[in-house]
Image: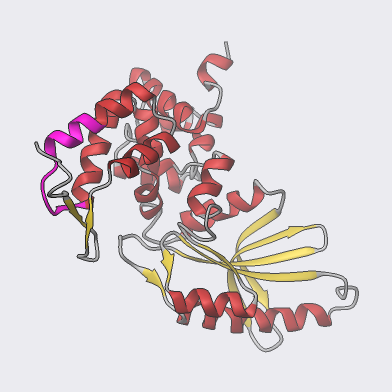
Amino acid sequence: MNLGKTMPMKVKKANGELAVFDEEKIRNSLVRVNASARNIERVIEVVKGEIYDAIPTDKLYRIVFRELKKLRKGVAGKYNLKRAMMALGPTGYPFEKFIGALWESDGFNVRTGQVVKGACVSHEIDVVAKKRNLTEFVECKHHSSNGNVCTVRNPLYFYARFLDIERREVAIPGNTIRKFKGWLVTNMRFTSEALSYGTCVGLGLLSWNFPPNNGLRERIDRAGLHPITCLTSVSRPQKKKLMDLGITLCSNLCERPEVLSEIGIRGSKAEKVIEEAVAVCGAEHPLHARH
């Protein structure tokens, strides 16, 4: 297929906009998930053979993901991260547990699903994280489909709740030296208004790609905390059963491989699932470590 410079191939984004196909974007995304140079070139060649003008980015993603699964499932799981985050639903509770684990990786003591008293009313807070004299209150906004955004209404509403909580907390004797911070976290993105307002009032904001180079994707990669929904060797119903049993992370499964038998995965199938989980999170193989 001719991908010459005279007629650049286009891709269609989820919002309907057209953009020039950029081979380097695919290459960089594969480098980020530690795909080997050989496998990267294999995937790129397949993409070049199947791409057509105005191909939806979702179709392009599926081509890359399909080829990665053939080559190395652990890498495919990491590449699948954004969709895996969308699959942490539909209740949002697994997403809260996941974000709590992310805060724990930064040294915080974490509780999820808390009811916290404010000066006026009580508030349900998704994550309460404490470290030394700092307490952070985290609101999680999970979206299960691509294209959803957090609008300015989200930080407006949460900031009002945070102020009510902070007002009561600072009035408690002995709390004058404590610091409090509110965070709004989403697996998608913030609108420009939401970013402007949240930044202006001092809320911490964390989305898939914000702050730049320190967004949700980068923090997950650095912490090695990949969700169980990354795994390609487990069906969607099986993933739900694992999350119901408290297995939110691939590392949870590496620590508790015996839980697979509780959902009917045994023998060589269980071994394959654990091998993929190990490859995704970079842990020592738990079944081998016990020998």
Q: Which residues are magenta?
A: 44-56
Residue 17 as seen in the image, left or right of residue 287: left
Question: Horizontally, is 100 left or right of 1 in the view?
Answer: right
Q: Position of residue 129 (x, y in %)?
A: 68, 60
Q: Is residue 111 above or below residue 38?
A: below
Q: Is residue 146 above or below residue 249?
A: below
Q: Position of residue 82 (x, y in %)?
A: 38, 50
The answer to whether residue 57 is left or right of residue 25 is left
Image quadrant where residue 172 sits: bottom right
Residue at 39%, 24% in the rendered image: 36
Asked whether 270 falls inside the magenta stretch, the response is no
Name the image quarter holding the C terminus. top right
Q: Does the magenta segment cover residue 55? A: yes
- Residue at the bottom extreme of this rendering: 120
Q: Position of residue 84 (x, y in %)?
A: 37, 47
**Near-viewer residue (240 or 49):** 49
- Residue 27, picture quadrant: top left
Name the residue rendered at 74%, 84% in the picture.
167
Residue 280: image location, x then y, percent: 45, 32
Which of 221 and 193 lies nearest the eye of the viewer?
A: 193
